[in-house]
Image (tube, grey):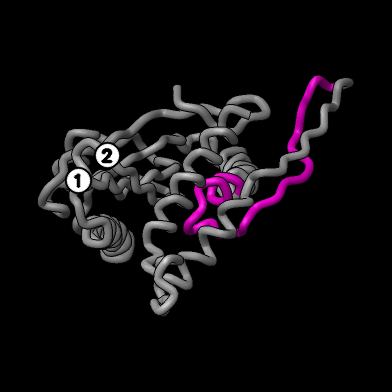
C-alpha cells in the first residue's frame, strides 16, 4: 500500500505539471488552444482519475493479500502509477525466465548495475547523452563477441535487461538520468575498471554502481 501511495503522489505531481503546460486560459475566451495544450489537457484529465480505485483480496488461508482490480489511465510513459504497475508485471514475467536460465547455468552471477551521467537542466539532452553512451558500451561488447578484440569489463555480461529512470532535484533544478540493469555475469566485474571505461565513453561521469543480488522466496531478487 505504501508503494501505491507513493506512485499515486508522483502521478498527481505529473498531472499538476501537465496543467501548467496548458497555455489556454479559461478567462480569455478569445484564446485558441494549440496542439501542445490539447495534448496536455487530455493527459492531465486521464491522470486525474488514475489509481483512484483499487480492490484488494485477502486470502486468509495462505496469509496473502493481492491486488485484484484497479483503474488506471494506461499512460505508462507519463504516469508513474501506470509505469509502476507495468514494471511489476514485467518483473514477474522476467523473474520466471531468469530462474530458468539460472537453473541451466548455476555459475552465472546475478547483479544490479546502475549507470549515470552528469546532472543537467536539459532533460532531453541529458537523456539522449545517457542513451547514446549505453549504446556505445553495448556495441563494444558486441564487437568483442564477434571479433574477439576490444575487451572491457562490460563484456563479462552474459545477458541483461535494463530500464531508464529520470529523477528531478527541485533544489538544483537539475535532472538526474540513470539506467538500471539486471545482469547475469560470467565473472565478477572490476568496478574501478568499469568506471574508467564508462567515463571514457560519457566524458562526464565515473559513476558505476554494481551490487550482488540474490533470489528471495516469492519476491524475486533483492540486493545482498
The magenta stretch spans residue 7? no
Helix, strand or loop under label 2:
strand
Residue drawn at the location 84% of the way across and 22% of the way down: 62
Question: Magenta stretch?
Answer: 62-85
Distance from Cα at disc 1 to Cα at disc 2: 9 Å
**Circle number at residue 217:** none
Q: Which residue appears farthest toward the right when viewing the image? A: 61
The magenta stretch spans residue 65? yes
Residue drawn at the location 40% of the way across and 66% of the way down: 25
Whether residue 50 is visible: yes
Residue 156 percent location from the top left of the image: 33, 45
- Is 100 positioned to the left or the right of 58 in the image? left
Residue drawn at the location 22% of the way across and 48% of the way down: 152
Quick one: label 1 or label 2, which is nearer the N terminus? 1
Mark 1 and 2 residues: CB-CB less than 8 Å, in contact?
Answer: yes
- Nearer-the-camera pick, 191 or 80: 80
Residue 98 percent location from the top left of the image: 57, 43
Quadrant of residue 31 in the image? bottom left
- Is 119 positioned to the left or the right of 102 in the image? left
Please tell me how crowded label 1 is: few (under 14), some (14-19), or many (20+) other residues with Cα within 10 Å: many
For disc 2, the marked residue is 169
Residue drawn at the location 80% of the way across and 20% of the way down: 63
- Nearer-the-camera pick, 37 or 221: 37
Residue 178 percent location from the top left of the image: 31, 46
Whether residue 97 is visible: no
Q: In this view, does 29 lie above or below 161?
A: below
Q: Is residue 176 above or below residue 22?
A: above
Q: Quadrant of the C terminus?
A: top left
Q: In this view, does 112 lie above or below 72?
A: above
Residue 89 percent location from the top left of the image: 63, 47
For disc 1, the marked residue is 119
Amino acid at each position: 500500500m505504501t508503494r501505491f501511495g507513493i506512485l499515486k503522489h508522483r502521478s498527481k505531481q505529473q498531472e499538476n505539471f501537465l496543467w501548467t503546460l496548458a497555455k489556454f486560459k479559461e478567462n480569455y475566451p478569445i484564446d485558441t488552444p494549440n496542439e501542445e495544450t490539447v495534448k496536455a489537457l487530455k493527459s492531465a484529465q486521464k491522470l486525474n482519475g488514475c489509481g483512484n480505485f483499487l480492490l484488494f483480496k485477502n486470502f486468509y488461508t495462505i496469509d496473502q493479500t493481492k491486488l485484484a482490480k484497479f483503474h488506471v489511465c494506461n499512460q505508462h510513459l507519463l504516469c508513474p502509477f501506470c509505469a509502476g504497475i507495468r514494471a511489476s508485471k514485467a518483473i514477474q514475467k522476467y523473474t520466471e525466465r531468469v530462474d530458468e536460465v539460472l537453473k541451466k547455468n548455476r555459475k552465472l552471477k546475478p547483479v544490479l548495475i546502475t549507470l549515470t551521467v552528469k546532472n543537467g537542466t536539459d532533460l532531453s539532452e541529458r537523456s539522449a547523452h545517457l542513451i547514446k553512451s549505453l549504446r556505445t558500451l553495448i556495441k563494444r561488447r558486441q564487437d568483442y563477441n564477434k571479433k574477439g578484440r576490444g575487451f572491457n569489463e562490460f563484456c563479462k555480461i552474459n545477458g541483461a535487461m535494463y530500464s531508464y529512470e529520470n529523477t528531478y532535484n527541485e533544489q538544483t533544478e537539475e535532472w538526474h538520468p540513470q539506467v538500471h540493469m539486471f545482469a547475469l555475469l560470467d565473472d565478477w566485474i572490476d568496478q574501478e575498471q568499469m568506471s574508467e571505461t564508462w567515463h571514457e565513453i560519457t566524458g562526464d561521469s565515473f559513476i558505476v554502481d554494481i551490487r550482488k543480488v540474490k533470489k528471495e522466496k516469492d519476491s524475486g531478487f533483492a540486493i545482498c
